[in-house]
Image (cartoon, rainbow, N blue to C red):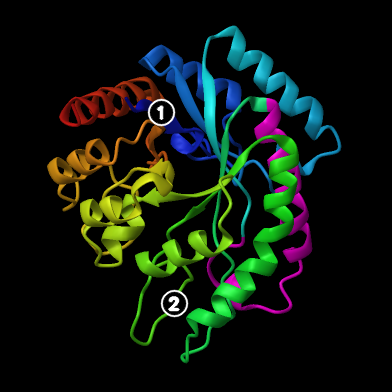
Amino acid sequence: MMTLSASTWLMSRIPGTKSRYTIEQCLSAMKAAGFDYADANLWSLGGRDAPLGQDNWLEWAENTRAFADSIRVSFRQTHGQTLSGQQWDDPNYADAEFVWAINYRCIEATRILGAQWMVMHPWNLPHDPLYSRQKAKEANFRYLAPYIEAAKKAGIGIAIENMVDFRGNRRRYCGGDPEELLELADAINDPSVGICIDTGHAHFSGIHVGSFIRMAGSRVKCTHISDNNRDGDRHLPPFMGSIDWADTMKAFADIGYTGDFSLELGSHNFPDSTRAPWCRFVHDLGEALLAMAK
């Protein structure tokens, strides 16, 4: 049986301001809406001006765990730090070393929060029209190895996320192709390494989501659930795009997936006054989807 969860990205920046909701505000709203599980989006919490970028980051993680325990919300998966967009292609991106270092903090925060898995994006080679799967695999062995070892010491696993594959003349990301991602996970060949199925990334890439889930099988350890119309990684709620949700939910049942069904929807700049009904809507939508998998 899957457990219903949502990313703490559900409440991110406060509309009309440069401020963020605190994770306590987000967890409180999610709990009031009926969520008992949350996916800690450590990516959005790992910038220089964010909690994991501060000197007291360990205290923040411990306080967050204590608060979550006090309202009976549990973490089973988190999202680690990574580069964004064109930062991968910029050899002079000033914060690259900071981002890589913060991922070790994300691993320790995942342990403190009590989650079993941390999702990571695979390494993406600088843009090259002559994309090489072999070079990408070799680069990921080097990139992921120290994080996998650190995670094992912390008692957690790493779930590698499928990325968007634009193909053609546009940017290709490692893991955008299902076979490539599964080959990478199989080549690493470690029980503490699995994959995270991002339904939005798969659908935008022209991949049939249910077929991908069945192909991945027991390798699936985490999920990022959203919808789109193959017009962008929109992070729309399910049924607001064109994913076949009946088959997607049947696919999760077919492989016997029992991890988090984590809705990664973002806040879409809704006014603050709508936060409570937004969280309730997301929760009820998730429950309806889980009922389709029975």
Picture residue at 75% right of the left edge, 40% below the top: 153
Nearer to us in this view, 137 or 164? 137
Callout 1: 10 Å neighbours few (<14), some, many (20+)? many
Q: Is disc 1 placed on a helix, strand or loop?
A: strand
Along the horizontal axis of the image, is 213 left or right of 183? Answer: left
Where is 276 relative to 262, above or below? Answer: above
Callout 2: 10 Å neighbours few (<14), some, many (20+)? many
Would you identify the image quadrant in which residue 140 lies? bottom right
Picture residue at 68% right of the left edge, 14% below the top: 66
Name the residue that disc number 1 marks.
5
Q: Is disc 2 placed on a helix, strand or loop?
A: loop
Q: Position of residue 261 (x, y in %)?
A: 36, 34
Name the residue that disc number 2 marks.
172
Along the horizontal axis of the image, is 17 left or right of 66? Answer: left
Where is 68 relative to 61, above or below? Answer: above
Q: Is residue 66 magenta-colored?
A: no
Would you identify the image quadrant in which residue 97 lies? bottom right
Where is 219 relative to 111, above or below? Answer: below
Q: In this view of the protein, can residue 255 be seen by the observer?
A: yes
Q: Position of residue 222 (x, y in %)?
A: 44, 41
Picture residue at 29% right of the left edge, 46% below the top: 236
Query: Of the residues shown, which amino acid type is indicated by label 1?
Result: Ser
Sequence-wise, the earlier of marks 1 and 2 is 1
The residue positioned farthest toward the top in the image shown: 70
Q: Position of residue 168 (x, y in %)?
A: 33, 85
What segment carries the magenta color?
A: 83-112
Compute the Cα span from label 1 to label 2: 30 Å
Would you identify the image quadrant in which residue 98 lies? bottom right
Q: In this view of the protein, can residue 49 be seen by the observer?
A: no
Q: Quadrant of the C terminus?
A: top left
Nearer to us in this view, 47 or 20? 47
Give the mark count. Answer: 2
